[in-house]
Image (tube, rainbow, N blue to C red):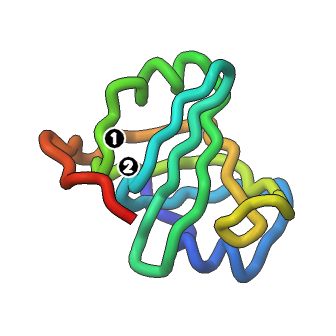
Amino acid sequence: MQRTYIGGDILRGRANGREVTVAGWAQDIRNLKNVTFIVLRDSTGRLQVNVKDQKLRDAVSDLARESVISVSGAIVEEPKSRLGGAEIDAYSINILNRSDAPPAHGS
């Protein structure tokens, strides 16, 4: 799976529905009742990944912060997003390298 975009490209050239593949570090992971949110960080910035499919949610349920992942999905424009107004609805996640002991969470 080859990266087709970097995070900053998605935020600069939003195209609702465009399929992309991005890679980076899982900076933050939030599991809610029906969705998991992953803040993905690369050299250009951060973007939010929405994981709604239950099989994908199960696959990333034990993912530690700072693990390296590749995500394929569709760009979704979200004006309320604090990370630039665009997010990715994931349909595929590949764990490239798991973090065994992530650093302490800080701001």
The disc label shown at residue 84, or none:
none
Q: Position of residue 90 (x, y in %)?
A: 62, 41
What residue lies at 20% left-to-right and 45% top-to-bottom? 99
Image point 39% across, 51% down: which residue?
26
Tell me where residue 30 appears, x and y as whole percent.
Answer: 52, 37
Percent from the top left, x then y, of residue 61?
41, 24
Q: Residue shown at 52%/24% (left/top)? A: 57
Q: Residue furthest front?
A: 107
Q: Marks 2 and 1: CB-CB under 8 Å? A: yes
Q: CA distance from mark 2 to mark 1?
A: 5 Å
Say which label, 2 or 1, has the lower sequence index.
2
**How would you rate the neighbour count of disc 2 (Cα within 10 Å): few for under 14, some for 14-19, many for 20 or more?**
many
Residue 17 appears anywhere in the view: yes
Q: Which residue is mark 2?
A: 69
Q: Nearer the viewer, residue 2 or 97?
A: 97
What secondary structure is marked by label 2? strand
**54 or 82, which is in the foreground?**
82
Density class for disc 1 (Cα within 10 Å; few <14, some 14-19, many ≥20) is some
Quarter of the C terminus within the rendering: bottom left
- Amino acid on which disc 1 is placed: Ile
Residue 12 is left or right of residue 29, and the answer is: right
| Amino acid type shown at disc 2 | Ile
* Left or right of 46 on screen, residue 51: right
Label total for image? 2
- Name the residue located 57 percent from the left edge and 33 percent from the top edge: 36
Helix, strand or loop for disc 1: strand
Q: Give the x, y percent position of residue 86.
A: 74, 63
Q: Name the residue at the left extreme.
A: 101
| Tag shown at residue 95 | 1
